[in-house]
Amino acid sequence: MPADDVLRGPSDQSESLEEPIGRYPSTASLPEDDRHRVLASERRRHVLAIASARPAPIPLEALAAAVVAREDADPADDETRERAVISLHHVHLPLLDDHGVVEYDPNERELLA
């Protein structure tokens, strides 16, 4: 199942959470509602996939470029990459860090784990 189809919406709620847990083991200990919230965003799913495939620390700018490339946007486009940096720094990485799924250092702007 493609990453885009992990959480389809209300019509597919009979799907167990075992497949998303298998793809994103760092979410296994989360309560079901939190796991749905964490995995609801395609951008956060990209972050988790990238984090599991690369050694830490990952600089925010490198993470943003990798996320943009997975979203089929032009990673060389400075404006697109900068928008990704901003949304990762202010929205997605803090949420993932708050749920204990990743460790993000906003001062160093690095994904640590």
Image (tube, rainbow, N blue to C red):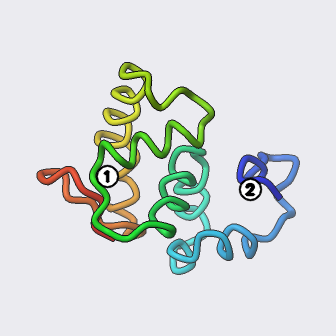
Question: Mark on residue 83?
Answer: none
For mark 2, what is the residue? 6
Compared across the picture, whether 4 is left or right of 64 comes to: right
The amino acid type found where label 2 is placed reads: Val
1 and 2 marks in contact (CB < 8 Å): no
Q: Is residue 24 above or below residue 92?
A: below
Which residue type carries mark 1? Pro
* Mark seen at residue 94: 1
Numbered disc total: 2
- Residue found at the far front of this picture: 76
Q: Quadrant of residue 21?
A: bottom right
In the picture, the quarter occupied by the N terminus is: bottom right
Residue 99 placement (x, y as % from top left): 39, 65
5 or 75: which is nearer to us?
75
Pinpoint residue 27: horizontal percent, then vertical percent.
Answer: 53, 72
- Rendered location of residue 60, percent (x, y): 29, 47
| Marks 1 and 2, the one that precedes in the sequence | 2
Camera-side residue of 104 and 60: 60
Which quadrant would residue 104 be assigned to in this image?
bottom left
- Who's the residue at 42% across and 40% down the image? 65
Q: Secondary structure at mark 1?
A: helix
Which residue shows up at 60% across the image and 45% down it? 42
Quote the CA–CA distance across marks 1 and 2.
22 Å
Residue shown at the point (35%, 51%) measured from the top left: 93
**Residue visible at 20% across and 58% down?**
105
Drawn side of residue 12 relative to residue 67, left or right? right
